[in-house]
Image (spheres, grey):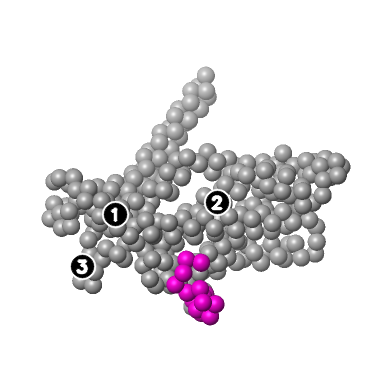
Amino acid sequence: MDSVRDSKNKSTFAWAIAFVFALIWLAAAFLPFFFMVLNSFKEKFEMLVSGVFNLPESWYPTNYIEILTGTFWTFFFNSIIVVGISLILLLFISACASYPLARFKFALAKPLYGVIVACMSIPIHITLIPVFKMATYTGMYDSIWALIGPYIAFAIPISVFILTTFVGGIPLEIEESAEIDGCNKYRMFFSIILPLAKPGLSTIAIYNGVNMWNEFSFAYTLTQSAGKRTLPLAIWEFQGQYSMNTPMIMAVLTLTVMPMIIMFIVFQDKLVKGMTAGAVKG
């Protein structure tokens, strides 16, 4: 009885510690968002006078009205186009690369996989100048199409790494049964592997979609005119040479992160399934 009681006490204590850490993590994650939304409803100099965490003297929705009636939608649709096309191509390329790496046995399988994984260690900042020169030489500079190539290239290593592990966890017996029924490799890939790999594809789509949506370096380097820029650069429209409208910038940031928050709320179950489905082989 004493051992059972001690075990229950330890379990209760462990859950209490976990709950405390969860509250700390929630506060650390929620406070910046609360700060951003709170100050987005203030007037230009109000947060400097009354304090950043004080409630607005009067809720000021004009910031959002000016943003939504201005050039915000141009930035928004540019981001939608770039992220949408980049994710579609990324998922297809990653799936086509992961299937042979996970299933086929050939001499260069492990070296190729090692090179792809090693590419995850390349920082994007050392490639800004070469990519800028390539975009200039090809005539794609200052267009949203110049962003698609770098976004895909830097997302492929982590995507192939995750998807190769996931595809390797799919039971081989399913493919053997399909092969006995006369299914060739191409049909097996599109009719069996891709449907079974949906959780893994969802995981890399959400993970890379957030990174592409918030990407700043390439968007700043490869675009110049306001009509060709994406949402992370929208804040440049609300700052001048000597001053900036901080509440307006907070409103822009709030509108920018809302699509990602909604996406996480809607697809969080798919993200969790994708992260855990390949952990145990069938």
* Residue at the (72%, 54%) spot, across then down: 99
Report the magenta residues as a range.
130-145
Amino acid type at circle 1 is Thr
Residue in front for this viewpoint, 22 or 219: 219
Q: Secondary structure at mark 3?
A: loop
Counting from the top left corner in percent of width and height, residue 167 is at: 69, 49
Looking at the rendered image, the quarter that the C terminus falls into is top right
* Residue at the (70%, 42%) spot, across then down: 281
* Residue at the (57%, 51%) spot, across then down: 204
Q: Quote the CA–CA distance across marks 2 and 1.
A: 31 Å
Q: In the drawing, does residue 276 fall left or right of residue 227?
A: right
Which label belongs to residue 110? Answer: none
Amino acid type at circle 3 is Ser
Residue in front for this viewpoint, 10 or 196: 196
Please report whichever mark, 2 or 1, sits nearer to the chain's N-terminal start: 1
Q: Is residue 137 magenta?
A: yes
Is residue 150 depicted above or below 130 in this figure? above
Residue wearing tag 1: 69
